[in-house]
Image: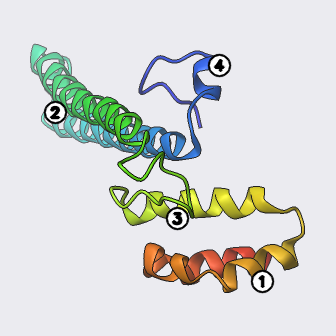
Amino acid sequence: MVIDIIDLDDPQFGDLSSLQMSMVREAQAKKDEILSQAEEERGKRFRALLTNNTARSSMLRDLYAQIDAEAERQVEVVREDLLYQLAYEEHFSGGNEAGPYRYPENPNYNLAYPQRFLVVRDYYMHVTTNPEARLEAFGMDTLARSYLGEYYQTLYDLLRSYC
């Protein structure tokens, strides 16, 4: 996937956490979908004008400009939302009165469940390289059951697949 929703060079991308990278990838997927829909709409409008023998008129250029402007507006909304999410996550990733956020010592309950999934997955992937020990440790983690909610079983199945 080519990531061009925001301008970051390789070192800056390397500094992003897995949570931030997932936000960037999700925003990039939204942008790609918007551009794909715009291209589809352009083709549909061209074919409609072509059937009426007006495809060479200035109407086509105006329609394309309108479609492109709307797509760019939607992409800008996604970009601004991504930048806000990255700033918000960076601001709240610091911690609270109990100290810095770190699973399992001080989990961040401000995160959405998919983001919590990534945090817990990263934690267990770095705890040990032994897949059986990792699965056993995760299975005994009572905090993960409440912290992940319905994502607990998904992570359990993922860790089990490594065994």
Pointer 1: residues within 10 angstroms few (<14), some, or many (20+)?
few
Give the percent coordinates (x, y) of residue 115: 46, 57
Which image quadrant for residue 72? top left
**Which numbered marker is on residue 49?**
2
Mark nearer the N terminus (4 vs 1) = 4
**In front here: 7 or 49?**
7
- How are the colours assigned in the image? rainbow
Pointer 3: residues within 10 angstroms few (<14), some, or many (20+)?
many
**In front here: 140 or 150?**
140
- Which secondary structure, mark 4? helix
Q: What is the CA distance from the residue labelled 2 to the residue labelled 3? A: 49 Å
Q: Is residue 88 above or below residue 76?
A: below
Give the foreground label among 1 and 2: 1
Q: Residue at x 68, y 78 (%)?
A: 138
Mark nearer the N terminus (3 vs 4) = 4
Give the foreground label among 3 and 1: 1
Give the foreground label among 3 and 4: 3
| Tag 1 residue | 136
Mark nearer the N terminus (2 vs 4) = 4
Give the percent coordinates (x, y) of residue 22: 51, 46
| Amino acid marked by disc 3 | Phe
- Which secondary structure, mark 1? helix
**In front here: 95 or 118?**
95
Q: What is the CA distance from the residue labelled 1 to the residue labelled 2? A: 63 Å
In this rendering, does residue 23 appear at all? yes
| Tag 4 residue | 10
Which image quadrant for residue 53? top left
| Amino acid marked by disc 2 | Leu
**Which numbered marker is on residue 117?**
3
Q: Residue at x 51, y 47 (%)?
A: 19
Mark nearer the N terminus (1 vs 2) = 2
